[in-house]
Amino acid sequence: VRVTFTSPHHREDGLSGTIAVLQDVTEQEKLERSRREFVANVSHELRTPLTTIKSYLEALDDGAVDDPQLAHRFINVTRNETERMIRLVTDLLHLSRLDSKQAMLSKEETNVPEMLEEVADRFSFQLQQKDIEIDIAIEDGVSHVMLDRDKIDQVLDNLVSNAIKYTPEHGSIRIEARQSAKSSALEVSVKDTGIGIPKKDLARIFERFYRVDKARSRNMGGTGLGLSIAREIIKAHGGTIYLESELNQGTKVTFTLPVKDEERVAG
Ligand code: ADP
């Protein structure tokens, strides 16, 4: 929002200056409110695992430590909670770097089909565990693109990991890539046959910490930041990201990356 201040001296009504100031305050208040919400969310997200860890440590101290089986279970819980906290703090660091524009993109010429094969490989164990099939469909003409490989890998990892998390056993995932002719962009989508997202949540799904079901996301080890990180990374590349979903049918997340003609290398 651009706020233009018009000096009242130059206007007979002298009102537009006041209006401009009000708009400015509203914008600032909005920013301030979202900053406060963010800090409250972060604090809450960190306090939850810490409280759990504390109570399990107390239980161990109160005698559970003498029962090897119980002790083993309790220690596992505290380890899982610790790992989730590490993931959360790592995600927060990523976001803050993306926010402060410290994260300069370092683009390299990347073989797109290879990159997509590799993301599927990284998840082969989890896919096997849930008996989820994955297939990759690459249209003719998709080959090399200039992109920040680490960051786009992070986007793909977030999308595929969500697809696995929110798809029941025996489901399937499809990764598609195509070169959209009219906008000269690479278009990649990750589609699953999972639980889907209710219509009312769709508009807010890319917001930080927004989840359809907090408890489910936590149980799955989620931080609630995956999609917002993906959006920042795609934005930094000058692309777009959007999500389509049908409750109990599945979800499809698509991102585009602009490809300059001179960047496209024949494969
Ligand atoms: P989380 O760590 O909770 O998965 P994300 O930012 O990655 O956080 O996603 C935000 C929320 O969007 C999730 O909690 C979940 O409710 C919903 N979501 C994301 N991807 C999918 C998907 N493929 N299927 C169903 N719901 C999804």
Image (cartoon, grey):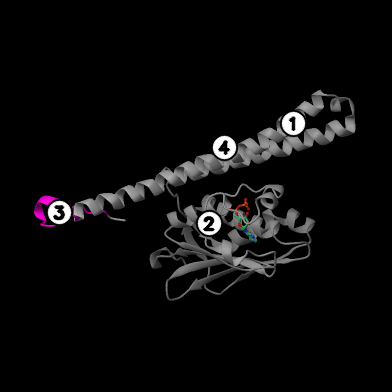
Label 1 – label 2 distance at C-alpha: 33 Å
Task: Kindly report the distance in space between the C-alpha atoms of the residues bearing marks 3 and 2.
Answer: 41 Å
The disc, 1 or 2, on the residue closer to the chain's N-terminal end is 1
Distance between mark 3 and mark 1 Cα atoms? 63 Å
Name the image quarter holding residue 157: bottom right
Q: Nearer the viewer, residue 242 or 174?
A: 242
The secondary structure type at the circle numbered 1 is helix
Nearer the viewer's eye, disc 1 or disc 2?
A: 1
Q: Is residue 72 left or right of residue 250?
A: right
State left or right for residue 68 relative to residue 124.
right
Marking on residue 43: 4
CA separation in Å, label 4 and label 3: 45 Å
Which secondary structure lies at badge 2? Answer: loop
Q: Which residue is mark 3?
A: 14
The circle on residue 55 is 1
Are dots 1 and 2 in contact, CB under 8 Å? no
105 with respect to 143 (left or right): left
Residue 184 relative to residue 222: left or right: left
Q: Residue at x 40, y 68 (%)?
A: 261
Q: Residue at x 81, y 27 (%)?
A: 60
Place of residue 116 in the rendered image (x, y in percent of width and height, measured from the top left): 61, 61
Q: Earlier in the sequence, mark 3 or mark 1?
A: 3
Q: CA distance from mark 4 to mark 1?
A: 18 Å
